[in-house]
Image (cartoon, helix red, strand yellow):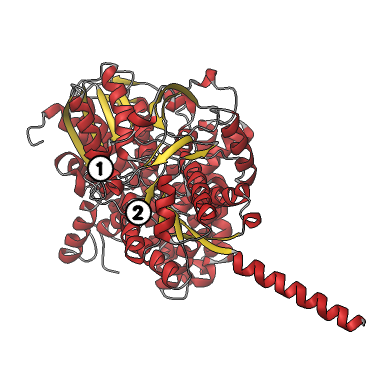
């Protein structure tokens, strides 16, 4: 009798296990970014942590979605990025690729993901082309883009009287896109561009370019670069008395990790555009506190926040459909409005652009800061419908 | 751009000279090490970075400011160099150059990896010391006091090093020890110790440049990796192992690079390598190199 009982129990157990396995949807998310170079702090391991937190907060396991997260270092090189993407999809069964800073790498990955029909959730990359001329039915661009940065910071500076601009631009896809988008805003708002210089990426000494900017008679020096290049530019601008001389610096892409590296002494007074600030409200603070505990005390950047929110939204779509079919999931993600504690309410448009509020912030003076990572004053909130490029203007073939 | 004024041109030349000062101090250290030890020290960039980080740590952990760091950081990093030389490099003197290069390259990757793991890549802030902040309008440009200090400090260190090696008794021992270690040893001079101290000194020079760089460049783990390749080109152009050659070429190439940044900025990172290729074609031993 005992053996019969045991057999029955075993049979029942294996049946339920099999049933559970049949219902579980296995999802594999690949976080692809810079893990060792200039963007490793603003993306890197932090993005993996953010993706894991999204899976945990969503309670994926309890909802029948079995999520596995893998990660790799693309070294900011488009060829390495597209090779990893190809291998992940072809051999490792990856369904979603997330993050991918460095615009040139993201554009390459977007092509691969489109060809293989998977889903690409961009957070780290900036080029507005991802939802413009080079948009893809498989790509969602979540956190920010060059258009939003240009309009946020560029417009605010022109309105404050900075009509004449000089650009210091990183000589690759991202820098050129950022200069192009900002120059357009400056001209549209009644300003003019008096000169620009393209520097090799990455650079070390920017004093020569800053001196050219200084003698150009510009009122605003637009820094169309990122990471270490921006840090060095701002450090050296302070040294050469550029800001004391009345010229203003516009950091067109500055992350909170850059402000941390600069120190408030040097960075104070910079005006910049962000889509996320950890100390904005209770929701963001709660997220930041947990994130910080997992990330050596460092607060999340907007790129980390974007990875969290986009993965969360993806999982919601999979749950609603009980399927991970890329076409259906993309349609569902665009149909459902998004809501999360970090970006609030938002929506993914036909071109793949996720729209949400953006914030124009100013870096605090050292005496205004109450502690570590207390860096920003929020000047204005740019509402979602004005923060991003109007749907019809990007030249995306998906928009009819 | 071609209609640039004389004033602006002077300004750019001066900036080039300042960057050249960094090249000179770094390539000088490399030249000393190569000239006297025959080691191609690829860890030089990592040790330069370590110099900047030690300055940061002295300030943030011990409250010691820039001036103390300028002395202490080269000593500490030089000490690290001495340990590296004694425990590892000393085993390679009888082998081909390539082994020393591979070892120091590996060391550089390890050191950079450790700092990256501990401090991240964005870098750390280091403020210009109060005494050297601000600057003067010198007619054709605004010259930050700190940059002027960089030129003066580098020139003094470079010339002093050159003088010691070329014109003093200690220098003559060193040069003799390189030519014929057995013979010099027979005169009662401790050759291995001399070589160890030389390596420590070369490394100390790198750390000195690192401290000079901390207030104006981003203090981050890859700051040396970006610079080391250029500095190697400087050493090759100057002539491997030539002390005076590395100093003159360092300042000279800073000037050339500065001019490129004005007339064709996109090429600023490649111009030095173009010059290197041309020099190698015409004078394979470098501008100041002598046949061994």
Mark 1 Cα-neighbour bin, 10 Å: few <14, some 14–19, many ≥20 = many
Q: Position of residue A152 (x, y in %)?
A: 33, 28
Tag 1 and tag 2, C-beta contact below 8 Å: no
Mark 2 Cα-neighbour bin, 10 Å: few <14, some 14–19, many ≥20 = many
Question: At 8% from the left edge and 36% from the top edge, which residue is drawn?
Answer: B2
Residue B117 versus residue A167: which sits nearer the camera? A167
Q: Is residue B191 visible?
A: yes
- Left or right of B85? Residue B218 is left
Residue A59 versus residue A86: which sits nearer the camera? A59
CA distance for labels 1 and 2: 14 Å
Tell me where residue A347 sits by quadrant.
top left
Q: Which mark identifies residue A106?
A: 2
Q: Position of residue A165 (x, y in %)?
A: 21, 26
Q: Is residue A123 visible?
A: no
Q: Chain of mark 1?
A: A
Earlier-in-chain disc, 1 versus 2: 2
Q: Chain of mark 2?
A: A
Q: Position of residue B288 (x, y in %)?
A: 24, 57
Residue corresponding to mark 1: A177
- Left or right of B38? Residue A5 is right
Q: Is residue A16 above or below residue A274?
A: below
């Amino acid at each position: 009798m005992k053996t019969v009982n045991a057999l029955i129990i075993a049979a029942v157990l294996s049946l339920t296990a099999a049933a559970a396995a049949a219902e579980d949807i296995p999802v594999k998310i690949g976080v692809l970014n810079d893990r060792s170079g200039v963007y490793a702090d603003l993306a890197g391991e932090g993005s993996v942590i953010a993706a894991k937190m999204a899976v945990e907060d969503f309670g994926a396991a309890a909802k029948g979605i079995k999520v596995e997260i893998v990660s790799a270092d693309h070294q900011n090189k488009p060829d390495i990025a597209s090779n990893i993407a190809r291998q992940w999809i072809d051999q490792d069964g990856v369904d979603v690729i997330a993050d991918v800073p460095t615009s040139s790498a993201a554009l390459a990955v977007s092509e691969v993901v489109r060809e293989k029909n998977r889903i690409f959730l961009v957070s780290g990359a900036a080029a507005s082309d991802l939802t413009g001329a080079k948009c893809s039915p498989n790509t969602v661009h979540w956190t920010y883009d060059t258009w939003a940065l240009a309009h946020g910071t560029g417009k605010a500076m022109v309105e404050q009287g900075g009509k004449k601009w000089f650009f210091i631009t990183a000589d690759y896809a991202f820098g050129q896109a950022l200069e192009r988008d900002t120059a357009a805003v400056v001209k549209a708002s009644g300003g003019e561009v008096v000169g620009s210089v393209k520097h090799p990426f990455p650079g070390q000494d920017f004093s020569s370019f800053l001196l050219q900017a200084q003698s150009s008679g510009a009122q605003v020096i637009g820094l169309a670069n990122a990471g270490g290049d921006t840090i060095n530019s701002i450090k050296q601008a302070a040294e050469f008395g550029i800001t004391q001389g009345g010229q203003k610096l516009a950091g067109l892409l500055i992350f909170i990790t850059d402000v941390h590296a600069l120190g408030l002494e040097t960075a104070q007074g910079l005006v910049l555009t962000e889509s996320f600030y950890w100390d904005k409200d209770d929701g963001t603070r709660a997220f930041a506190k947990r994130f910080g505990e997992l990330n050596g005390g460092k607060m999340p950047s907007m790129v980390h926040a974007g990875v969290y929110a986009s993965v969360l939204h993806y999982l919601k779509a999979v749950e609603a459909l009980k399927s991970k079919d890329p076409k259906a999931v993309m349609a569902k993600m665009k149909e459902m409005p998004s809501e999360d504690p970090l970006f609030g309410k938002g929506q993914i448009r036909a071109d793949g652009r996720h729209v949400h509020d953006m914030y124009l912030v100013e870096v605090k003076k050292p005496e205004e800061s109450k502690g570590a990572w207390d860096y920003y004053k929020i000047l204005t909130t740019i509402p979602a419908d004005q923060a991003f490029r109007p749907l019809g203007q990007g030249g995306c073939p998906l928009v009819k | 751009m071609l209609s640039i004024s004389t004033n602006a041109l002077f300004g750019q030349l001066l900036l080039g000279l300042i960057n050249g000062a960094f090249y000179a101090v770094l390539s000088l250290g490399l030249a000393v090490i190569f000239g006297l030890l025959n080691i191609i020290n690829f860890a030089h960039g990592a040790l330069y970075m370590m110099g900047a980080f030690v300055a940061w740590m002295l300030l943030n952990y011990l409250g010691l400011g820039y001036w103390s760091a300028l002395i202490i950081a080269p000593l500490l990093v030089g000490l690290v160099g001495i340990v590296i030389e004694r425990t590892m490099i000393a085993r390679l003197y009888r082998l081909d150059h390539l082994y020393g290069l591979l070892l120091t390259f590996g060391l550089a990757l390890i050191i950079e990896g450790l700092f990256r793991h501990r401090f991240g890549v964005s870098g750390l802030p280091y403020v210009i010391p109060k005494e050297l902040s601000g600057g003067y309008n010198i007619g054709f440009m605004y010259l930050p006091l700190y940059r002027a200090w960089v030129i003066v400090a580098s020139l003094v260190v470079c010339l002093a090093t050159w003088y010691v090696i070329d014109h003093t008794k200690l220098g003559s021992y060193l040069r003799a020890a390189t030519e014929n270690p057995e013979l010099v040893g027979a005169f009662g001079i401790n050759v291995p110790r001399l070589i160890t101290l030389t390596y420590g000194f070369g490394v100390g020079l790198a750390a000195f440049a690192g401290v000079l760089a901390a207030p104006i460049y981003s203090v981050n783990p890859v700051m040396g990796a970006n610079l080391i390749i250029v500095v190697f080109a400087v050493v090759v152009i100057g002539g491997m192992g030539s002390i005076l050659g590395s100093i003159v070429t360092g300042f000279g190439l800073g000037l050339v690079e500065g001019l490129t940044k004005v007339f064709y900025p996109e090429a600023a990172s490649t111009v030095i390598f173009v010059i290197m290729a041309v020099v190698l074609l015409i004078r394979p031993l470098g501008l100041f190199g002598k046949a061994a």
